[in-house]
Image (tube, rainbow, N blue to C red):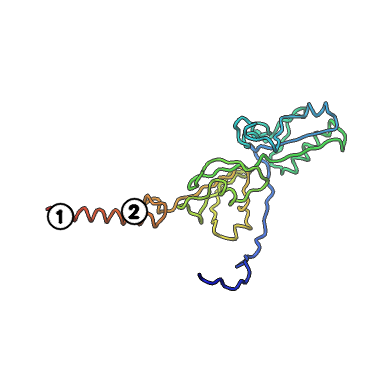
Amino acid sequence: MQELAQSTGPLIETSKKYPYQPEEYLLQVNDIIEVNIRTTDPDLNRLLSAVVFEPGFNQMQAGGQSVGDVFFMNGYSLDEMGKIELPLIGEVKLDGLSVGEAKVVIENEVKRFVKEGEYFVRVRLGGVRFSALGEFNASGKFTILQNRVSIFEAIAFAGDLSRVAKRDQVLLVRQYPDGTQIHKINLLDRDLLSSEYYWLKPNDLIYAEPMKVKEIGAGGTLVETFTLITTSITAIALLLTLVQNNN
C-alpha cells in the first residue's frame, strides 16, 4: 500500500474573493408578488385579506399544484398597466418600483384606513421564475422560492447541462422595462461571480447551445462520436474485404 504523504493541510488552493454586484430588481408587467396586510382591527383584516401562501403549504394540500402555481393562484400579478388590485384598497401601480418601494406605496394606501403603527405590510416576490432550454438534462420552466438565485443554482435546478453543451457560450435572455436583451455568458470565467449576470432575475431564460460534435455524430462526447465513426469505417472495410474474397 502506498504510504500517505505528510499532511500539509486539507486546503490546496483558495481563489481571490469576487465581490457581489447586486442590482436591485424593479417590478415589471406579469411579475407575481405576495402582499400581506395586517392591522389591529379584526374586521378590517377580513376586508383586506386574500388567500396567502403559507410556508407549510405543500403540493398535496395544493391538489398537486407546484409551489410556483400556488403563488400564481394566490399572489398578485402586475397587469399590462403595471397595476395590482388589492381588496378594499383597489388598484395600485407598482411597475418600475423595487419591492421595498412597492411596500411603501401600499403602506401609504393602508394609512387611509388605519392609524400609524396599527398595521403591518409585507411585500415579496413570488420566487424567481426562469426557463432553461436547449442542452439541459431537464429543460423546462421553473420557480425557485428564494429571494436570490445564482445562475449555477438555476442550472443545477434544471438537472445540469448535458455533456455536449457549450459551457463557454450560454445565452441569457433578460427582460428589462424598455425591452429584452440577449447576453452570451462564459460559465468558465471566474469573473462571472462578480458580474451582473451571476444572479438571475425573474423571467430570465437560459439557453444552452450544443457543441458541433452533436451535429456530426450520435455520440454524447467527442470520444464517443470518434469511436462510433471508427467502428463504422472498420465494419465497412470488413464488409468490402468479405465481398472481394467471395469474388
Estimate the spatial distance between the alpha carbons at disc 1 and disc 2, rounded to whole Å: 24 Å
Q: Give the x, y percent position of residue 110.
A: 81, 33
Identify the residue position indicated by label 1 in the image: 244
Tags 1 and 2 in contact by the CB under 8 Å rule?
no
Q: Is residue 77 above or below residue 186?
A: above
* Direction from residue 234 to residue 185 in the image, left or right: right
* Direction from residue 4 to residue 219 in the image, left or right: left
Q: In this figure, what is the number of numbered marks?
A: 2
* Circle 2 crowding by C-alpha within 10 Å: few under 14, some 14–19, many from 20: some
Sequence order check, earlier mark of 1 and 2: 2
Q: In the image, what residue occupies the spot 68% across and 44% down?
A: 26
Q: Is residue 62 above or below residue 163?
A: above
- Foreground residue, 31 or 210? 210
Q: Give the x, y percent position of residue 146.
A: 66, 45
Q: Quadrant of residue 175?
A: top right
Instruction: In the displayed orientation, state which residue is furthest to the front.
Output: 1
- Foreground residue, 180 or 21? 21
Q: In the image, what residue occupies the spot 62% across and 45% down?
A: 176
Q: Amino acid at mark 1?
A: Gln
* Circle 1 crowding by C-alpha within 10 Å: few under 14, some 14–19, many from 20: few
Q: Secondary structure at mark 2?
A: helix
Q: Give the x, y percent position of residue 55.
A: 70, 38
Q: Amino acid at mark 2?
A: Leu
Identify the residue position indicated by label 2 in the image: 228
Q: In the image, what residue occupies the spot 35% across and 57% down?
A: 226
* Direction from residue 179 to residue 98 in the image, left or right: right
Q: Quadrant of residue 69?
A: top right
